[in-house]
Image (cartoon, rainbow, N blue to C red):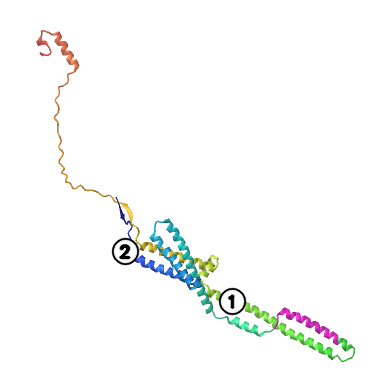
Amino acid sequence: MRRMTNTAATPMTTRMIAGSLATVVTLVCAGMAGLSAVERSQTASGAIMFVALALVMVVCSHLLPALARDSKVVRWVFVACVGVTLYNHAYFFQSEKDASSAAAVAAVQPSADVLGIQAQLDLIVARALPVVAADMSNAKASVARAVAALERCSSRDVRCTSAQATLEVAKAKVDALHDERAQAIRAEGLREQLALAMTAHSAKVAAAGGNKVDISIARMLGIDASTVATATSILQSVVLEVVGALLWAVALPQKPVATPVHEVRRDRRIHIRLPEVRVVRPYAIEARPVPPRLIGWVQKAMAQHVGHPRDSPAAA
């Protein structure tokens, strides 16, 4: 006969504690999945559907293993639900990381070096150095032509007012281009300093926006910090899902197991055990066997002593 018995009964106190912890874990996972669903949606109706889908996936991934322990189909459904839930959790972790990075970057003060160099660059109105160099070459050629014209004019002993004016204008243009060239060279140097200052400031901003632990692990493993952040997010999500499923498995009662129970039927009749009586049989008295040679000797003797009874062995 088989009876339904629970061979591994869990104490009620343990089940109550596990149920409380499982409820907390499920609420945490549901909240994370719901927030990530809201962030991905663009409309109110879409947000409602995304949130409902996320909650269903979380509840199924936590309760299915406890409700159907021996079903292989349920195991595959559980794996699918966990996969969808992990995506929601990873999206939530990434969104929070981006928001934290943006706040940290906004808190970084602008670099004083960058501001000072940029202010100096704003005051320089010189053109690019290659353009100034080209104009300088043309201006020097104009000065050379003006000098040649002035010399030709002076050889004729005439007033060379026009040639002299042309030479003065050419020289003034060369002088102006010399100043502009100096400013262009200074601007090039300031731009190089600005690039260095902006690189240092960008490194400072990146350090403020990144997670120090992720950066340290990335340096140790030789990988990107974003890869470390994604891997840790998935790991945390997996741990949450597994802990939730295990706690619900402990909290919910297990299915009773049919075990064979042997019933012993007792006979109510009273049995009186009497002492055992042994029957002793007497020894049977039998005639002793007579040897055959003795019989033959007697017969022979009686035949020889017929008429002499006193000499016979029988008489003797």
Where does the image place residue 27, in percent across and percent down from the top left? 41, 69
For mark 2, what is the residue? 12
Mark 2 burial class by Cα count in 10 Å: few <14, some 14-19, many 20+: few
Most common secondary structure along the magenta stretch: helix
Residue type, mark 2 in image: Met
Is 39 contained in the magenta span? no
Where does the image place residue 145, in percent across and percent down from the top left? 83, 83
Name the residue located 41 percent from the left edge and 67 percent from the top edge: 26
Name the residue located 39 percent from the left edge and 69 percent from the top edge: 24
Instruction: Please give the range of residues in magenta.
Output: 126-150
Q: Does residue 163 sit above or below 199 in this rendering?
A: below
Could you say whether the residue bearing mark 2 is in a helix, strand or loop?
Answer: helix
Instruction: Name the foreground residue: 255 vs 179.
Output: 255
The extreme front residue here reads 45
The answer to whether 126 appears left or right of 35 in the picture is right
Quarter holding the C terminus is top left
**Of the image marks 2 and 1, the number of the one nearer the N terminus:** 2
The answer to whether 272 appears left or right of 153 in the picture is left
Instruction: State the separation of the CA atoms marked 2 and 1.
Output: 62 Å
Instruction: Name the foreground residue: 32 vs 215.
Output: 32
Is 138 contained in the magenta span? yes
Could you say whether the residue bearing mark 1 is in a helix, strand or loop?
Answer: helix
Whether residue 293 can be seen here: yes
Whether residue 243 can be seen here: no
Instruction: Name the foreground residue: 298 vs 187.
Output: 187
